[in-house]
Image (tube, rainbow, N blue to C red):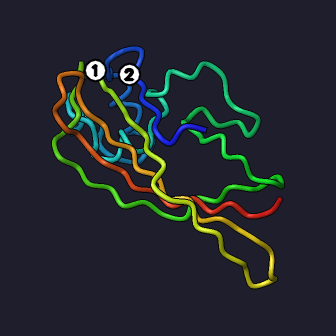
Amino acid sequence: ASDVYKRQAPEPIGAASIRHYALAIGADPDRWADEAPPTLLCDTTQVTGNRSPDVNGYLGHTWDLPFPRPTTMIRGGNDDTFHRPVRAGDPIVTVWRLDAIVERTDNAGEPMALVTTTATDRRQDGSLLATNTETLIHRVA
């Protein structure tokens, strides 16, 4: 498995995506007509270009990690930094980086792994939009 994955969204962020996201999070869609709520980039699967979900029903980016036993993944938390608003028409390039894998043992003595990743979102011209560092917990299934 590679420790870096880069993907350009198949189309620019659209006004309809911004409006639907605002509605989904309970925000006023008129407030977010052309500029996205800050968390859109951290939540959208639009940037992956995936056309069908994985075996877990997920459309977003996942890592193909070679664990010796099947695991269940739990999202452990995010640290987001927003550099500039995302606007309708922005072409997005995202680079996901695998930062660390730390082995631990849970309270029952079972092995688990804490996986830290960072997604960096930029406009196609290189201007920085957002970074999202996420902790993923992989427990034996």
The numbered mark at residue 48 is: none
- Which quadrant does the N terminus fall into? top right
**Quarter occupied by residue 68:** bottom right
x, y percentage for residue 112?
A: 71, 68
> Which residue extends farthest bottom?
107
**Quarter occupied by residue 72:** bottom right
Q: Out of 11 and 22, give the one closest to the viewer.
A: 11
- Which quadrant does the C terminus fall into? bottom right
Q: Earlier in the sequence, mark 1 or mark 2?
A: 2
Q: Amino acid at mark 2?
A: Gln
Q: Is there a contact, CB below 8 Å, between mark 1 and mark 2?
A: yes
x, y percentage for residue 95?
A: 38, 36
Residue that carries the numbered disc 1 in the rendered image = 91
Q: Is residue 74 left or right of residue 119?
A: right
Q: Out of 118 and 9, give the one closest to the viewer.
A: 118
Q: Amino acid at mark 1?
A: Pro
x, y percentage for residue 77?
A: 48, 63
At horizontal 36% and vertical 39% (from top left) the residue drawn is: 41
At horizontal 24% and vertical 22% (from top left) the residue drawn is: 124
Q: Residues within 10 Å of mark 2 (few under 14, many from 20)?
A: some
Image: 109 above or below 48 = below
At horizontal 38% and vertical 26% (from top left) the residue drawn is: 17
Residue that carries the numbered disc 2 in the rendered image = 8
